């Protein structure tokens, strides 16, 4: 787990001050790799790689950038969990280290760009092919590890984090289409970011720089080829075996492991299986909010820890932590994204780093197996529509309203969401109905100057993903989970990467193993979502292996934060002051005076205020302080290299 960076002249001519550029990028990402630093510059000076190392595998000989001795070089961030099997297949005699990074070099030498199809793990890497005079870059299938890039005149730059690219932009400016996505979904679509000129390589894609051009292509896609003959018990057995194998692979480490344990089903399964598969008793980390019992899920995490003999390590979080650390969180994230749950993740990661460098987590379970309450809301409406139209039992993708009714207790805390959802547009097409559930922009009250954001339509971008050619249009459940898998999941993984790497922690996601995900996509929706039970098949696969208190709960909230209570109480002054400075009130795209005026209109668990507060902090941290990311001019003294901004 590391930070990677690089620069190449598209015409392969010499790059002026190349080493200085690489030093800049390494410095801005030093938190990602506190254990070491490396720089490689091509003999012709036409390209170079930077690397910051967090040592997890092969502590003695895994330094990067790394070469195969034949002119090829690589800089790599992540873990290839099946690297030992690939070593044996390729031939042990080829290798001089025990590093998974060397496996990338040798696999590329044998299989070329097709090597990525053989990797199981999380990765982002750039590899220079000396024979082809080409740069080959790849990102893992789910976007667990980041890869940002920009093209400026005749140069291509890449890095693990967008902030490392800012010195090479003409200016720090907002991408208005990315902003429109953010205001709608609280994340960007199709590789956009909030920085104009900075893109992300999409998950499951590779990028090649050769002959003066930059090309990208997809190398992996999940296919929803439903096996309608699948038996529920057989599905559970195969799923259980797949999870167990994946967790076993994710235990490979040359340093001790820990885990994040939220009290939900996914992280509880990962921790339980890890213990069963032979892991020594390890610490599990969770956050809680004293004084706010309705937000405290620690008793569920504690129950699992007790049942499996794990060391329970809770960290108490309060409004003072929020006030003190929120700007640092926004800086670590590069741009605001996802929801308020990123704050406790950030704080728990800081606490966990005192004890461990590697942690397991349950990321991906909600998107792969269907864990969001909005699926139940949307499906319930479709059941009513089908009953009225007399089509309720047509087809093979049906969950009937009779079966779904007993599980509607899960919606008890979502009455405001239901009222908003049914306020207008009842029984529209499935895509428009689901868009209403994920559209955060509907909650604004005049704070955003939409007329300045252009004609770009987030809904049309949403539809293009929602109706992906790999999903059957009859399966509403698969359409919904597929959209979240392609968009929300990478956004949440972005948060997970940044909040963990900000503190020098490697976070692993055993539920995001591609053979496991590919199998899950073949399970019929009426098994995955039987009778409206969220994550039914995953829950059934591990019945009896986790405490009933955790397995049977229907109120999982996804790391809830008392943000609304804080913003009206102990953190109110901080929020108002942040939004009321002269610069804040002068923003052209957002009326922050209106945000303050509407402060008390925020519903419990609302995201409008959170999204706008973080947007303002992002502008303060990156736009207002753009001078801190200045690229050194040729001849500048070494101490002028930009450092990590304050925080």
Image (cartoon, helix red, strand yellow):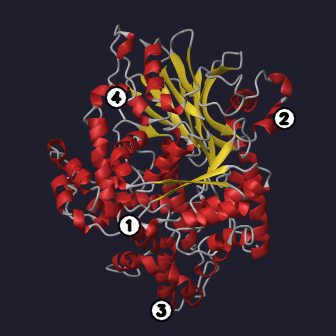
Q: Name the residue carrying label 4.
A: 169
Determine whether, in the image, residue 580 is placed left or right of residue 457: left
Contact between marks 3 and 4 (CB within 8 A): the answer is: no
Distance in Å between CA atoms under marks 4 and 1: 37 Å
Q: Name the residue carrying label 2.
A: 89
2 vs 1, front mark = 1
In primary-sequence order, the first of circles 4 and 1 is: 4
4 vs 1, front mark = 1
Contact between marks 3 and 2 (CB within 8 A): the answer is: no
Contact between marks 4 and 2 (CB within 8 A): the answer is: no
Distance in Å between CA atoms under marks 3 and 2: 59 Å
Spot occupied by residue 377 in the image (x, y as percentages of width and height): 47, 77
In the image, residue 503 above or below residue 601: above
Distance in Å between CA atoms under marks 3 and 4: 56 Å
In primary-sequence order, the first of circles 3 and 2 is: 2
Number of other residues with Cα within 10 Å of mark 4, as a class: few under 14, some 14 to 19, many 20 or more: some
Can residue 31 be seen? Answer: yes
SS type, badge 2: helix
């Amino acid at each position: 787990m590391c930070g990677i960076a690089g620069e190449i002249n598209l015409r392969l001519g010499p790059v002026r001050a190349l080493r200085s550029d690489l030093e800049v990028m390494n410095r801005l990402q030093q938190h990602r790799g506190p254990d070491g630093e490396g720089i490689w510059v091509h003999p012709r000076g036409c390209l170079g790689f930077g690397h910051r190392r967090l040592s997890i595998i092969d502590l003695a000989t895994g330094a990067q950038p790394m070469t195969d001795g034949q002119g090829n070089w690589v800089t790599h961030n992540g873990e290839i969990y099946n690297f030992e099997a690939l070593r044996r297949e390729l031939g042990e005699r080829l290798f001089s280290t025990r590093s998974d990074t060397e496996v990338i070099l040798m696999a590329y030498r044998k299989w070329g760009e097709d090597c990525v199809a053989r990797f199981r793990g999380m990765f982002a890497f750039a590899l220079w092919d000396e024979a082809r005079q080409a740069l080959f870059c790849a990102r893992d299938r789910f976007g667990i590890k980041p890869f940002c890039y920009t093209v400026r005149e005749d140069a291509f730059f890449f890095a693990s984090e967008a902030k490392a690219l800012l010195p090479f932009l003409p200016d720090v400016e907002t991408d208005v289409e990315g902003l429109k996505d953010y205001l709608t979904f609280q994340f960007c679509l199709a590789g956009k970011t909030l920085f104009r000129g900075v893109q992300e390589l999409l998950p499951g894609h590779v990028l090649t720089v050769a002959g003066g051009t930059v090309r990208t292509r997809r190398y992996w896609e999940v296919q929803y080829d439903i096996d309608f003959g699948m038996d529920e018990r057989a599905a559970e057995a195969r799923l259980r075996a797949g999870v167990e194998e994946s967790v076993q692979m994710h235990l490979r480490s040359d340093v001790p492991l820990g885990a994040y344990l939220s009290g939900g089903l996914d992280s509880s399964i990962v921790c339980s299986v890890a213990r069963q598969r032979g892991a020594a008793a390890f610490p599990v980390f969770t956050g809680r909010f004293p004084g706010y019992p309705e937000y405290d899920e620690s008793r569920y995490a504690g129950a699992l820890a007790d049942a499996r003999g794990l060391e329970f390590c809770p960290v108490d979080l309060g409004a003072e932590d929020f006030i003190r650390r929120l700007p640092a969180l926004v800086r670590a994230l590069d741009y605001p994204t996802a929801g308020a749950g990123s704050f406790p993740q950030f704080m728990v990661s800081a606490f966990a780093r005192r004890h461990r460098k590697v942690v397991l987590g349950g990321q991906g379970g909600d998107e792969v197996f269907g864990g969001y309450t909005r699926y139940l809301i949307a499906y319930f409406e479709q059941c009513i529509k089908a009953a009225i139209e007399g089509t309720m039992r047509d087809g093979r993708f049906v969950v009937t309203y009779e079966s779904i009714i007993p599980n509607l207790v899960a919606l008890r805390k979502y009455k405001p969401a239901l009222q908003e959802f049914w306020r207008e547009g009842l029984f529209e097409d499935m895509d428009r109905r689901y868009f209403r559930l994920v559209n955060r922009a509907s909650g604004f009250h005049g704070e955003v100057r939409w007329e300045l954001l252009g004609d770009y339509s987030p809904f049309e971008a949403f539809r293009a993903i929602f109706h992906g050619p790999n999903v059957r249009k009859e399966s509403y459940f698969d359409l919904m989970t597929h959209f979240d898998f392609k968009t929300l999941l990478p956004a949440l993984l972005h948060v997970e990467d940044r909040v963990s790497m900000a503190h020098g922690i490697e976070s692993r996601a055993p539920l995001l193993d591609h053979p496991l995900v590919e199998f899950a996509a073949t399970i019929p929706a009426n098994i995955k979502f039987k009778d409206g039970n969220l994550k039914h098949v995953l829950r059934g696969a591990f019945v009896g292996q986790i405490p009933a208190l955790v397995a049977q709960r229907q109120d999982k909230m996804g790391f809830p934060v008392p943000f609304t209570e804080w913003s009206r109480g102990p953190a109110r002054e901080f929020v108002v002051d942040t939004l009321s400075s002269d610069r804040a009130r002068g923003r052209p795209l957002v009326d922050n005076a209106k945000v303050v005026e509407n402060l008390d209109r925020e519903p419990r668990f609302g995201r409008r205020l959170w999204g706008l507060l973080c947007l303002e902090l992002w502008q303060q941290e990156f736009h207002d302080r753009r001078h801190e990311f200045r690229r050194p001019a040729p001849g500048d003294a070494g101490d002028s290299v930009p450092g990590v901004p304050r925080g």
